[in-house]
Each structure stands twice: as structure tokens, then as C-alpha cells.
Image (spheres, helix red, strand yellow):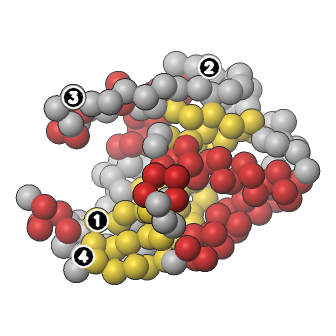
Amino acid sequence: MEKCIASQQDVADLLDRLARQIVQKYPDNKTYCLVGIKTRGAYIAKRLQQRMEKLTGAAVALGELDISFYRDDLTLVAQDPLLKSTSLGTDIDGKVVILADDVLYSGRTVLCALRALAEFGRARKVEFLTLVDRGHHCLPICADYIGMDVKTAADDIIHVHLKEKDGDDCIMHDIGGQRQHK
């Protein structure tokens, strides 16, 4: 059973709140950068950048990170995985890097992103932003910025729809979805 747990307006409100939290914490936008984990994390980071620019009048550095080569489950995800490009858009040495993604589940994606990010320099600090934290973390990873917490069962699926990828904005909770797809 799939149900909508956040509408288009809810998603916009979550992004607005997250942008304000970052701007309040880091008033000088030269000290940090946003890096979205491809694919949906990159769209989220871009939207955050736009909102933050409206709040401050200045653009924050923005990058995209492909973690495909760093996944330990690559063959489980796809037979012929499509590799995407990485462009951080800035030197991360000495900066705070705010990694963005759509859903935090096991934490393995964040671990892969940290490995990939290390190839590009030494950040002063790395923080993590997620639109949805659904629990069930397998690693000691937590988000610094959370759009919403959703209590889920291990076999549920949370899917964030974004206009750029899916044609609409909403967050869906598919209860028992993994059991149905096996």
C-alpha cells in the first residue's frame, strides 16, 4: 500500500526550512559548499542553493557527487550500472561540505559518498542533509539536517519524487513495498 506523506507544498516547505537552518548556521557562504549525491541529492542541493541565494543575495558553491564506483552493492543495483559524472564546482580543502541526499536508510550511501569525497580533497568538516530519515541505520551515521523523520518497517520503501526526475514533487511511503517487489 502506497500513500503520500508529503505533498508538493510540503516538499517546498521542508526545503525552505532546511535552507534557513544552513544560512543561520553559516552566514558566510564562502566557508561551505553544497554537494548533492546523484541523482536526487543533486536536485535537492540545487534547490537549496537557489533558496539560500534568495535569503542571502549570494550563491553558495554547488557540486554533484557520483558514488557509483564506491558502492559495495553495485552488481545488485544494476547489471550495467550507468556511471554519472562528478563535478564539485569548488575546492573543498578547508571548507565545510554539506552532502545532500533524498533518503537516509542504512547509511551505506553516506559512507560511499565520504569515500568518494575524500578523492577531491580534505574538507574541514562534512555534514549530511537528508529530506527523509527513515531509520534502520546499519552504520553509525546520522543527519545534521533532516527534512522529516518517518517511522518505517525494514521492508517499506520511501520514494522522494522530484520534478526534475519524476515529473512531480511528493514523498511516498510504500508500506511493505520490498516484500511485494521480491
**Tag 1: residue type?**
Ile
Circles 2 and 4 in contact, beta carbons < 8 Å: no
User: On the rendered structure, is 23 left or right of 64?
Assistant: right
> Residue 79, can we see it?
yes
**Tag 3: residue type?**
Asp
List the residue tagged with mark 4.
Answer: 175
> Which type of secondary structure does the marked residue at label 1 adopt?
strand
Circles 4 and 1 in contact, beta carbons < 8 Å: no
Q: How far separated are the C-alphas under marks 1 and 2?
A: 34 Å
List the residue tagged with mark 2.
Answer: 121
Q: How far separated are the C-alphas under marks 2 and 4?
A: 40 Å
Q: How far separated are the C-alphas under marks 4 and 3?
A: 29 Å
The residue sitting at 27% across, 30% down in the picture is 81
* Other residues around mark 4 within 10 Å, as few (<14) / some (14–19) / many (≥20): some
> Which type of secondary structure does the marked residue at label 4 adopt?
loop
The residue sitting at 52% across, 59% down in the picture is 163
> Residue 101, can we see it?
no
